[in-house]
Image (cartoon, coloured by chain):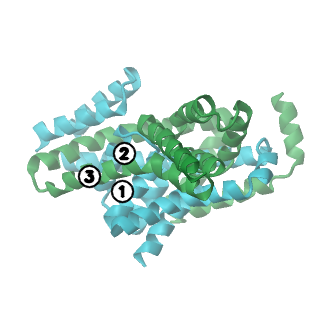
Chain colours: A cyan, B green
Amino acid sequence: MIYWELFLAFFIPNIVGYGGGPAIIPLIENEVVGHYGWMTSQQFAETLALGNTLPSPIATKMAGYIGYEVGGIGGSLIASFATVAPSLLLMLAALGTLYRYRDSIKVKSMSQWVRPVIMVLMAYLTWSFLSEGVASAGWIHTAIIGIAAALMLWRFRLHPVWAVLLGLVYGGLLLG
Amino acid sequence: MPTRSVHTQGQLFLAFLRIGLLGFGGGPSMIPLVHAEAVTRHAWMNDEEFGDVLAIGNTLPGPIATKMAGYIGYRVGGVVGCINAVLAVILPCIVAMVLLLGLFTRYRDQRWIQGMSEGVMPVVMIMMAQLTWDFWQKSRAALGWIATLVMGLVAGGLIYWLDVHPGLVIAAILIAALLRPDRSRRARTEADG
């Protein structure tokens, strides 16, 4: 049962998640935190923070780790399989057909029309991380870390690993 | 032949291991690395084929890096090659996640670990804000800001107010895109051109 739930929790976001790995994040959060309650919002944020400091696709890292947390190695395999296999099998099976439609306006519309929805899901997730942060660390610390991280990522274009390290060190020293 | 196929599988594994370990920044940032291995280094396909596979991969949902790995692995080494290449891309970092976060969870009751967890929350919030902004920019460029705003508000209302599953909202949009009449295709192409 848990394996089936894990499969669905990762199959659905990946089969509707047009726009690559990051588009899938809010959809996974919706399943893992919202629907099944396997993780708190804070645990999800930790996973995402660490995931962003490591290489390789974000969607499979999230699936492999959350699958492991929920259902051990079997769970990790199921969640990774649900992330990778459906679109890969489709690609292997229907390569010729897909090739003919690769420039079709319909296919382009699919990924374009989905973007505003993903944007709203991401905005909502941003908001819930913000309110979660304010609730646990207070708004002064949240503002200091947030502004510092924004400067590092947006202004100085540093790798996310530095922003995550900043958050960890600041939190370990001042919020513990 | 068996030695040769073992050799090929080994090459596939190492190629996609390198791609997985060097691919900081997620799937799309890995595409040039895939190109370097599959076209430049091993000549498993030429430039044109690579472009085609990439274009086809982009017509499907899900992460692009594993689609590329699986397809190239299949072409070079059959079903075993497919599984081999996908695992080489995803496995090392999943193991790293499990080990690092496992360590983190074990000491969760330590106050300073709790502090670290709280300190990282605003950073993730900023990353998510960045992604939101990226999607707003891309969407505005393709659809215009009015359509983006209206679609976003309608979708937000359905999902957060009426509690419709986001997967259903997106599925409905995908179907609408597939059913869109072909006539607008020519009109659109002319308008764009």
Q: Judge from the rendering whether residue A33 lies leftward or rightward of residue A174; answer left or right.
A: right
Circle 3 residue: B99
Assess whether mark 2 and mark 1 are in contact (beta carbons under 8 angstroms). Answer: yes
Q: Is residue A38 visible?
A: no
- Which amino acid, mark 3? Leu
Mark closer to the observer (2, 3): 3
Q: Quadrant of residue A68?
A: bottom left
Task: Classify 10 Å Cα crowding around label 3: few (below 14), some (14-19), many (20 and above).
Answer: few
Circle 1 residue: A65
Q: How far, Cα to Cα, is label 1 from label 2?
A: 9 Å
Circle 2 residue: A51
Chain to which mark 3 belongs? B
Assess whether mark 3 and mark 2 are in contact (beta carbons under 8 angstroms). Answer: no
Q: How far, Cα to Cα, is label 2 from label 3?
A: 12 Å
View extreme (top): residue: A156
Task: Classify 10 Å Cα crowding around label 1: few (below 14), some (14-19), many (20 and above).
Answer: many
| Residue that appears at 68% across and 54% down | A91
For mark 2, give the secondary structure.
Answer: helix
Q: Which circle marks residue B174 in the picture? A: none
Sequence order check: which comes first, mark 1 or mark 2? 2
Mark closer to the observer (1, 3): 3
B115 is higher (above) or lower (below) than B189: below
